[in-house]
Image (cartoon, grey):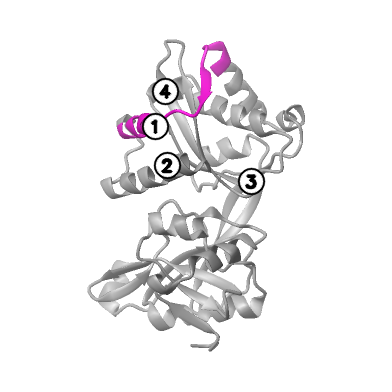
Amino acid sequence: MTNPEIRFVKNADIDRQKWDKCVANSSIPLVYAQSWYLDLISPSWDALILGDYAHVMPLNIRKKFGISFLLQPIFAQQQGIFPEAGQIIQNAFLTTIPDRFKYVTINLSASHSEPFPKGFSVESRTNFILNLSPGYEELKKNYSKHTRRQIKKAVDKKVFTLKGIQPDEYLHLKNSATDSKLSPQSMQTLKRLINYGSLHGNGTIYAAYNQDNTLCAAAFFLHLGNRVTYLNAVSDEEGKNVNAMYLIVDQFIRDHAGSLLTLDFEGSVIPGIARFYSGFGSAQELYYCLKSNSLPIPLRWLKK
């Protein structure tokens, strides 16, 4: 390895208490890098660790045809090195990766910066975050005209919201919504995350009902420290018709305005979804997707 202090550590040998403390020390302590979260989304994760947990990096490993791949798992928008590191440490971690993995796709959090080591293709992506410390009326002033109109339409159609529905209700809606289908494996992962959040008190579900008292939309928010992530959401056709998700997010902002929280929308490359997030006055936050491909040539072509 490039830096002898950075060592590859198998899952069973990771000190989870030290790991979580290290992640929490970051200026962007993403829930995606907490050990319990990694256990739920990528049970066989391993790690790169510098010294006595001075810096850590989760490795989400998959194997196929006897070849190890490093891939970004579902429900983890960003990961990388925690806490934030200078260029030398950052790139020392990253240069160790090609030694073990022939194909890599990883998303690095906004705390990382260019330039990155040679051998990676780099793509910048946009996240959306909203500082909730101002009062609600001040936050609402920054809503787009489109967003304010959609919220008014939902209110006029007598949509109302509730906080704290049961995970099974959320998952049933997720399964039944025509354009929200996940693979059975991804649904099980989502179920584990929602159940964990509900059990440990750091997950909250906001739901919307139409005037007939029928559940039509819901969103799952996951808290870690002062950051809360809009982790997953679903609307059925009725929910879309009555603009229910606009009312859900507005209600969440109303409930937490004036707090120290930052709402992390996660961002999207889909223009309509990006417009939805930005319409609440959120700010853009850039992060990076790094890829490398040193597979044997026939497999390399398949992965392009």
- Amino acid carrying label 4: it is Cys
**What residue sits 56% from the left and 69% below the top?**
81
- Amino acid carrying label 1: it is Tyr
Q: Mark 1 or mark 3, which has the lower sequence index?
A: 3
Q: Mark 2 or mark 1, which has the lower sequence index?
A: 1
Residue beneath label 2, please?
Answer: 194
- Amino acid carrying label 2: it is Ile
Place of residue 222 in the rendered image (x, y in percent of width and height, measured from the top left): 52, 44
Residue beneath label 1, please?
Answer: 170
- Which of the two discs, 1 and 4, sits closer to the camera? 1
Q: Compared to 56, does 222 lie above or below?
A: above
Q: Mark 4 or mark 3, which has the lower sequence index?
A: 3
- Amino acid carrying label 3: it is Ile
State the SS at label 2: helix
Question: Which quarter of the picture shows residue 215?
Answer: top left
**What residue sits 46% from the left and 11% below the top?**
211
Q: Mark 2 or mark 4, which has the lower sequence index?
A: 2
Q: Residue 216 bears which disc, if any?
A: 4
Residue 62 located left or right of residue 253: left
- Quadrant the C terminus occupies: bottom left
Q: 24 or 182: nearer the eye? A: 24
Cα gap from disc 2 to disc 3, whole angstroms: 22 Å
Q: 284 or 255: nearer the eye? A: 255
Residue 41 located left or right of residue 258: left
Magenta residues (range): 154-175
**What residue sits 51% from the left and 47% below the top?**
268
Cα gap from disc 2 to disc 1, whole angstroms: 9 Å
Q: Residue 129 bears which disc, if any?
A: 3
Residue 139 located left or right of residue 41: right
- Residues at circles 4 and 3 in contact by the CB criterion of under 8 Å: no
Q: 293 or 234: nearer the eye? A: 234
